[in-house]
Amino acid sequence: MQQSFVATRRFFDDRNFPKGFTRSGRFTLAEGNLLEKHGIALQELEQGSRTPQTDEEHHFVMVCKGEAEAASAVEKTWLKYKQRVQEKRKFHTVFGKKRIADSSDDFSYVEADSD
């Protein structure tokens, strides 16, 4: 029996996840490892640069085209990855939108006597 989603190298997305999938806080350890191990194969299958060899790979291609529901962990993880890449990341800051007016008379400065 042929093994599905075999990749010759690890998959990294330094543009969207510069610290790696597992350190991004957006994937579980298992999902991050799955993406690293099989991501190249999944990407090639989705783009059509690789021909599906097994039933699992055929079903994965159908899921990518929207012709079937994601059933396996591989399919669900890839869809989650695609969703995370497409969504805009919110940036939170401790500063508000309003700028505080610069008023120099809020503070009084006392010069120290030099005795």
Image: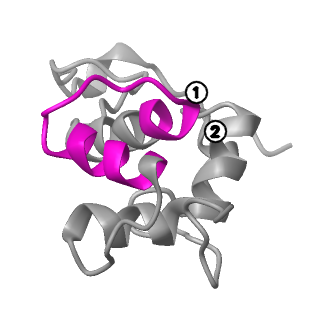
Q: Earlier in the sequence, mark 2 or mark 1?
A: 2
Taking the image as shown, residue 45 lies to the left or right of residue 34, namely left
Q: Which mark is residue 31?
A: 2
- Find residue 68 and report its horizontal and vertical position in percent: 22, 28
Q: Secondary structure at mark 2?
A: helix
Taking the spot 75% from the left edge, 37% from the top edge, the residue there is: 29
Q: Residues within 10 Å of mark 1 (few under 14, many from 20)?
A: few
Taking the image as shown, residue 68 lies to the left or right of residue 114, namely left
Taking the spot 13% from the left edge, 34% from the top edge, the residue there is: 66
Along the viewing direction, whichever of 101 and 64 lies nearer the viewer: 64
Look at the picture and state if 115 lies above or below 45: above
Q: Which mark is residue 101?
A: none
Q: Residues within 10 Å of mark 2 (few under 14, many from 20)?
A: many
Residue found farthest to the right: 115
Taking the image as shown, residue 84 lies to the left or right of residue 98, namely right
Q: CA distance from mark 2 to mark 1?
A: 61 Å
Residue found farthest to the front: 1
Look at the picture and state if 1 lies above or below 88: below
- Residue 54, visible in the rendered structure: yes
User: The magenta stretch spans which residues?
Assistant: 56-77
- Residue 112, visible in the rendered structure: no
Magenta highlight: main SS: helix
What residue does disc 1 label?
110
